[in-house]
Image (cartoon, rainbow, N blue to C red):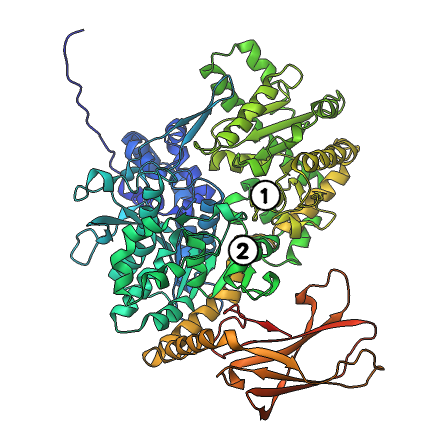
Amino acid sequence: MFPRTAFTITVNPKIPPRLKRLEELANNLWYSWDRSTRTLFSRLDPHLWEAVGHNPKAFLKRVDESALIKAAEDRSFLTTYNSILSSYDSYHDASTAPSNEGLDPQEQIAYFCFEFGFHESLPIYSGGLGILAGDHCKAASDLHLPFVAIGLLYRQGYFSQTIDSLGNQQVTYTVSNFDDFPVTPVSREDGSSLQIKVPLPHRDVTLKVWQAKIGHVTLFLMDADLPENSPQDRYITHNLYGGDKVMRIEQEIILGMGGVRILQALGIKPTIWHINEGHAAFMILERIHSLVQQGLDFASALESVAVNTVFTTHTAVPAGHDHFSKEMMHTYFDNFYRSLNITHEEFMALGHIPGSPDFNMTALAIHGSRTHNGVSKIHGDVSANICRDLWPQIEPEENPISYVTNGVHVPTFLAQEWSDLFDRYLGHEWRNKLCDIDYWSRIDEIPNHLFWSVRQSLKSQLFYGIRSRISEQNARNRGSDAHLDRLLKFVDPINPNILTLGFARRFATYKRATLLFHNLDWLRKIIHDQERPVLLLFAGKAHPADVPGQDLIRDISQIAHSPEFEGRLLLIEGYDLRLARRLVSGVDVWLNNPIYPLEASGTSGMKAGINGAINLSVLDGWWGEGYDGKNGWAIKPGLENMEGALRDQEESRALYEILQDQVIPQYYNHGKLGYSPEWVRMAKHSMMSLLPRYSATRMVDEYVTKFYRSASRKGMSYAANDFSDAKILAKWKTKIKHAWHGVTLRRLDTPCERIHFNENLNFKVAANLHDLSPDDVVVELLICRQFKTTKLGNFNHFKFEFTGTKDSHEHIFELKLTPELCGKQEYFIRIHPYHSLLTHPLEMGLMVWL
């Protein structure tokens, strides 16, 4: 071969004037939930559309100009194009905006998260946290909320997955070209690109700011890959969940502190600050620093920042919370804490959890916020217990951690076929009724045969996609055509009449992907019935550093390749948003069997449920509140202290029994029309009961009503009059902390053990307040009928009144009470600090019980 040099040149097409707004459509992630827009691009060149991974912006840079010219003269194409533009403009028309749930025009939400998942064309997500954040932004756009988001723009993002013939996960990273992403640089008024600087040890890191549009919402993303930075610093934002502790802390400093600086540079003044998981908690420090530089003392600045900060945790195990060593914190914040006018000990206390010397990001997020929540009812209780030491004298069930159960963005994950059917039978207004439970009972009016037809159509589409992926996987692994035929024996898109179970999620050990294979002999009998066959579909990724997770993939692959399971169990590689949308809409049953209570929420089952699939899940996460006895099947978890192997044995047995005795017979109990009326009835009920309760619209609306509105109003109140309320509360808390160790309570009346109904009880206690005043405390009685499992949340509360009497060092409090119920009752008497400016009455975590 002769020596030669390869040169490249890129030729971009000119978009005809008639189609000029295709560029606008390609640069707004509205297309991620508007299928008609994605279909419009696909019509121009279906093969190229597949080749660019359904990325409209990359597509427009590569499509042949002749295709664009032809489309500009095609009446059918132009009609569709104009119809889509009309919908797009209507969506963005402020005059059509729904009520923003009582937020005033000057109020603004800033939402910080480490990853965002909107669509496969913007690969800056890895899994559930990112998809949830993306759905949060989409729902905020639908509700026309004043909302901006902050994240990092990863050059490499998460990895692509293949699985070799031995079942080993192969990891491929792709370095992205931002020109192909639906993002644009943020410009200053003079036209220059906006850049900010964030201090790291011995240098400043320069960050370029990009923006992505998600309907009405703007997401600002930071990028360190600039010539001004050292090679090491350019790599900080290169990879999502990659690198060591140094990269992690630097990414989190940039996300939290850099995010605040972006908003300051743009003149955006949020009144609500939402930290989605602890990665962004350094935002709290930057905001405090800004107020201290304005002359506010640290304690008052902390109160002012915390009162309008909302913190959501998604982690159900203590080890899942980020933490950094004392030495690392000293390296990164030695000069910083001095600028706050506090000691090193006071600074480290912000991230302190008893029993650990490290600086914990969840502790910082909780200390720097006044509103905290888990992402399901069960997870709220788990989080309250995990963080109990941050409120040392308060029972976990009473501490300030609440919950908002996650939801999914219905327009994104509801299959187009359902949208069309709803338009026909429910009317177009269903899109504005996503939270109306009564409205969705109308699904029952859809004829059963049409409902079943849609389900089968979606399964056929899933099967076509699976055949393509399995064929590609088989060819790459040098499998024969005969072997491929065996693998795809039951995946028949023409005749999809096989019960299909799906399991697809991150392969973490607590999710127990292999629970279904606990007893292979029993499972073999279940799925090998010639009259009632079963197809099992598995997909998911394990983190490259998670060796046990990769072992699960290998185990499933080996079972799938065994002769008795070949073709009946398929492990599908390359799990991504696109495959997820197909799976949740196409399978008949969605499996989820985590170790209770480690599933914080889970949203894949919600996505399946709104598409008419039926959930079979352990009663954990969202399913613990979503299951109503008629909308799916539930595996009751074993006792938490049960030995692991025994728990797996018991719960796998329950899984087999449900499959064998209920799921399979019900699916194959075909009526005259060739389907099971009982199955359709349950699928309908699943959709009716889950869609209005687990939509992201409901979730975001709940954040507004429970947290955002009050956080904003309190934040503005604290900042008013030169932060007078913040100063008052900070001073009061300091007084309480210094005095509380000396507060005692003793009873002055003689306890009465028996009275008749309607008789009064008179309680009298003396409190040594140790330099506090009666206005600084609440003395209360809690009473409830006596049961073995009575929780404090079930007690009725009655407040003692200060009599105005002071005996020596004690203040006298009295309560007159007439019990409202008969029977044996249990009561407690306690005292805790109180101030009208507190966000949560027990936020200080201080309590003395009699």
| SS of the residue under disc 1 | helix
Check disc 1 and give the amino acid type. Answer: Trp
> Is residue 491 visible in the rendered structure shown here?
no
What crowding class fits label 1: few (fewer than 14 Cα within 10 Å), some (14-19), or many (20 or more)?
some
Tell me if residue 817 comes above or below residue 555 in the rendering: below
Say which residue label 2 marks.
374
- Going by the picture, which residue comes out furthest to the front? 808
Residue 514 percent coordinates (x, y): 61, 30
How far across and how far down the image is residue 350, in percent? 40, 61
Three-letter amino acid code of the residue under disc 2: Gly
| Residue to which mark 1 is pinned | 418
Q: Position of residue 747 (x, y in %)?
A: 67, 81
The foreground one among 709 and 385 is 385
Using the numbered discs, state the Cα–Cα distance from disc 2 to disc 1 in whole angstroms.
31 Å
423 vs 143, nearest the viewer = 143
Question: Mark 2 or 1, which is nearer the eye?
Answer: 2
Relative to 756, residue 685 above or below: above
Please report the residue visible at 37 percent of the width from the left and 48 percent of the height from the top.
325
Q: How far from the left and from the top, in percent, is residue 166?
A: 51, 17
Task: Indicate the quadrant containing the N terminus: top left, top right, bottom left or bottom right.
Answer: top left
Residue at 50% of width from left, 61% of height from top?
390
- Rendered residue at 64%/42% (across/down): 612
Q: Considering only vertical position in the picture, is 645 above or below 841? A: above
- Decide: is 443 above or below 290: above
Q: Does residue 820 appear to the left or right of 769 in the view shown? A: right
> Contact (CB < 8 A) between labels 2 and 1?
no
